Image (cartoon, helix red, strand yellow):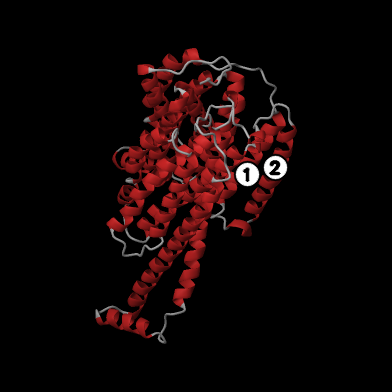
Amino acid sequence: MQSSSHTALPPLSGTPQVMGTLLLSLAVFMNVLDSSIANVSIPAISGDLGVSPQQGTWVITSFAVSNAIAVPLTGWLTMRFGQVRLFITSILLFVVASFLCGIAPNIETLIGARVLQGAVAGPMIPLSQSLLLASYPRAKSGMALAFWGMTTLVAPIMGPLLGGWISDNYTWPWIFYINVPIGLVAAWGTWVIYRQRESRVHRLPIDKLGLVLLVVWVGALQLMLDKGKELDWFSSGEIVLLAAVALVAFVYFVIWELGEAHPVVDLSLFRGRNFTGGVVAISVAYGLFFGSLVILPLWLQTQVGYTATEAGKIMAPVGIFAILLSPVVGKLLPRVDARFVATGAFAIFALVFWLRSRFTPEVDTWALMVPTVIQGAAMAMFFIPLTAIILSGQPPEKIPAAAGLSNFVRIMFGGMGTSLTSTLWDNRTALHHSQLAEHTGPHNPAFGAAMQSLTAQGMTEPAALAVLERNLGVQASTMGATDIFWMSSVMFLALIALVWVTRPQKSGAPADAGGAH
């Protein structure tokens, strides 16, 4: 297999290969963990720095925006500086940014440090993918992607658990300080193993306009998604303005990049049907999955009365199956059509969400755990084959750009999933609430009976009404959540069609330039 430079480097073997895989995974783990670890700690951070939780959420927004902008630039930056140099520099800057986050005396400094942290975290994920693929022979590429996928799937689940635990037992800066030793070890180890494997460097002109347009439309879109729910979407002037800016800048960006000789983002990748079909399928699925990742713990905490740690424990079993099955999927991939594996994954996802759509407020732990455990299997089966489909038929020098662009679209869809899901949940809850409320009142015998039994227990009428109102609220919120689960289930079935638009090569090898359609 060729490496990402034009002179073919042999794949690693033995100890360097194992260590290289571990170190690259460690860097990715630190990175992905960081995007989700702060979520749980927002109340602690905002309380400590004396700002409202709404302002506190900027700690997440700032990271997400700068990260989304930096990821698609990976291809261009790699050409300019070389993949090993870029990767190690990213890790070291990430460590510096983490330390700055930890010592931040006020919210402004913290948000500034998070912007830097998100920006330097951008190239780490796609580059770890291309460095890893170059470390394995072609027949083992499925295995390489399996290790990579395992890390990216387990970290978001570990994040809230670790973040909650650190915030409860230590102080919040430690959620950032924890990156310092991890990052230094990963950077040193990667340098030792990979320094001889640098990719060829080209001095390319900077596409300044493309870069500016990218920053503008991605920034505007991310801000709009993050703040939309808080500002009540399009009834707010700010949101309308952001949407308009994002749309105009996006249209100009696409036109400009397609005509530019050295584009900052190589949009010609979308001409390949494998790339396009695979990217859309993985991104929409990721958005649906991420939306549920937000809504389920929230519903458990606000409506069913779970604590943050207990809600985290309900979500954690996803990781078990994902870890156990990833290597199996990696071994199977070279022998099986990746499209069948992805179809299986989407079918399982559809089943998981259908099971969730039957939840009631009296749901027991067992009913909550079953879909979560099964979902782990689907996660192992959807990430790896779709990544293989996306990268199949790409020449080696295009792999960093393809990995960067596909990860970018996936991350954007994850953000959209989160914000659209929570808004949709609010809207459906309000709708169900008003529909349920229509059936209350003296004309409804069931309502009368419930009131009687509560007042018979010695409650005053207002207290009895408050109890019924709370029950009504829980029911409405649950019905809103189950509506979303049901819609997600249907959408997963629809995604199966997209998988069959692609035509990956038989070998399932991502680094084969022969079959570019």
Residue 191: image quadrant is top left
Q: Earlier in the sequence, mark 1 or mark 2?
A: 1
| Residue 464 horizontal/vertical position (percent) | 33, 77
Residue 76: image quadrant is top right
Q: Tag on residue 249?
A: 2
| Circle count | 2
Secondary structure type for disc 2: helix
Between 171 and 196, the one lying in front of the other is 196
**Front: mark 1 or 2:** 2
Residue located 64% across and 32% down the image? 265
Residue located 70% across and 42% down the image? 249
Q: Is residue 451 left or right of residue 210?
A: left
| Residue 52 horizontal/vertical position (percent) | 46, 49
- The residue furthest left is 457
Determine if residue 108 is in view.
Answer: no
How many other residues sit within 10 Å of disc 1, few (<14), some (14-19) or many (≥20)?
many
Secondary structure type for disc 1: helix
Q: Where is 396 relative to 320, above or below?
A: above
Between 140 and 278, the one lying in front of the other is 140
Q: Where is 91 relative to 369, above or below?
A: above
What amino acid is labelled 1 in the image?
Ala
Q: Where is 314 relative to 99, above or below?
A: below
